[in-house]
Amino acid sequence: MDKFDVFIFGTGTAGQLVAKECAAAGKKVAIIDIREYGGVCSQRGCDPKKLLLASSEAFESSKNMYGDGVTGEIEINWQDAFNYARRYTSNIPQNTEKNLKEKGIICYHGKASFKDAHTITLDGQEIKSDHFVIATGMQPLSLGIPGEKYAMTSGDFFNLKDIPEKVVFIGGGYIGMEFGHLLCRAGSKVTIIDKGNQILSPFDEFTSNLLEEESIKMGIQIIKNSQVSSIEKVNDRYLVHYSLDNSIHQITTDCVFNTAGRVPSIEELNLEQANVVTNHDGILVNSKLQSTSQSHIYACGDSSSRSLPLTPLSSIEAKVVADNLNGKNRKLKIPAIPSSVFTIPQCSGIGLTESQAIEANKTYHTVESNASDWFNNQRINSPLYGYKIILENDSNKILGAHIVGPEAAEQINMFAVAMKANMTFEELKDVIFNYPTWGNDIKSF
Ligand SMILES: Cc1cc2nc3c(=O)[nH]c(=O)nc-3n(C[C@H](O)[C@H](O)[C@H](O)COP(=O)(O)OP(=O)(O)OC[C@H]3O[C@@H](n4cnc5c(N)ncnc54)[C@H](O)[C@@H]3O)c2cc1C
């Protein structure tokens, strides 16, 4: 029977980091994945999405400068754009596995599950380990509606053969909005149906509403306060039934994507056999990222219940787990977390939204403006730029920052530094930035 010091489920950002750090510390380490090695971010998430976006960005900036220096026909070749992204992702599984093996890590494939708290089974074989790490990420939420099987998921997006004439996204979160923008620029007629009254609900209403208006101007149809009740296949198209204003409506489309949210991928692991407690956010862990019911079983990344499902968080959590397994006694400390929607323009936020500030009984004031006519935005003929900063009344500390604009994600990074360093808004504005840059604009916020 194989026996290890540390056995890791999942080869994404989190699992790989723990495996490498524990192997480097001299531990006997094994890792397993139910699919190809490498995880979501590099193959079905952040990176291929940004690669696809590169041609959209080039298209958009050329289009915006048309007649002001750019001339001639500009078009996106989507086959080339998809191939470009696939060229990057195609070698990841074998390179990831090779890299892990070179570090002495034993690599398994398949579906292993717990037999008891120290034993798992894989294809009838028993494997024991002193510690386990669950880093199995997330998967699309089940819609629970008739015809759900016709809905594609975010992973399928990267395997699209052709650009659909019409497409429906169920869910106006960041994945639906990002993919919706990509396909709209590619020429698809895009509809986004969301059950709430605000798209991008975790973001501040100010930036989310500005992005919604811009998306509608681009030609995206956004239907809010609406539930999709079923999907029907009619010949080679689909009929999506949705409720709106107390009646049922239909929309015909060439494809449908389930972008309604993601849930922890933990149901295959037979966690009850190991007495590992979970809830809808994932595996319940303490501040050292140990299961609250089994201290030798850790969880990190999207499958732990501790933090937002973002790649930088998976890395931070994985580092805490690795340090604890290597005897360093670390607790998870998370500073304010920036997050972005990579539409064009981008929508970014950090810290509290205004409604969260109200809910938390903060005494605050906001500094906000539509800055679309500012120099940096005008220079590239971009249609939209705006910000809202939420400041604590007495201290002038930054409680939250929200930006929509061409470089919002980079500008929010400045606020991430300021908030980590506990700077006041004035202290951030005292910094000398390069002129004329988007960072320097913060001085005029
Ligand atoms: C379309 C999309 C776009 C995204 N864009 C961004 C972005 O721009 N920025 C950002 O910060 N984050 C983004 N994310 C989120 C980011 O990808 C995740 O937060 C990150 O990948 C989580 O890493 P992880 O290691 O926890 O899990 P994952 O990368 O999901 O890795 C988990 C691994 O576990 C495997 N696994 C699952 N079940 C089992 C099992 N039972 N046994 C063994 N292995 C199993 C999976 O196959 C997978 O390889 C995006 C996600 C998606 C879907």
Image: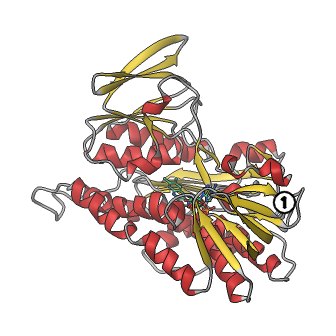
On-image quarter of the C terminus:
bottom right
Q: Quadrant of ligand 1?
A: bottom right
Residue depicted at 24% across the width and 54% down the height: 78
What residue does disc 1 label? 117
Q: Secondary structure at mark 1?
A: loop
Residue 394 against residue 14 in the figure, above or below: above
- Residue 312 makes an appearance in the image: yes
Could you tell me the amino acid type at mark 1?
Ala
Where residue 323 sits, quadrant-wise, is bottom right
Residue 349: image location, x then y, percent: 60, 56
Residue depicted at 52% across the width and 36% down the height: 171
Taking 309 as reference, is 238 left or right? Answer: left
Residue 135 against residue 140 in the figure, above or below: below
Residue 281: image location, x then y, percent: 73, 47
Where residue 9 sits, quadrant-wise, is bottom right
Residue 382: image location, x then y, percent: 34, 55
| Count of picture labels | 1
Residues 362 and 338: in front is: 338
Q: Quick one: label 1, few (<14), some, or many (20+) residues within 10 Å? A: many
Residue depicted at 52% across the width and 17% down the height: 243
On-image quarter of the N terminus:
bottom right
Residue 173 against residue 168 in the figure, above or below: below
- Residue 226 makes an appearance in the image: no
Taking 200 as reference, is 270 left or right? Answer: right
Tell me, what colour scheme is on the image? Answer: secondary structure
Residues 135 and 125: in front is: 125
Residues 379 and 52: in front is: 52
Residue depicted at 71% across the width and 42% down the height: 355
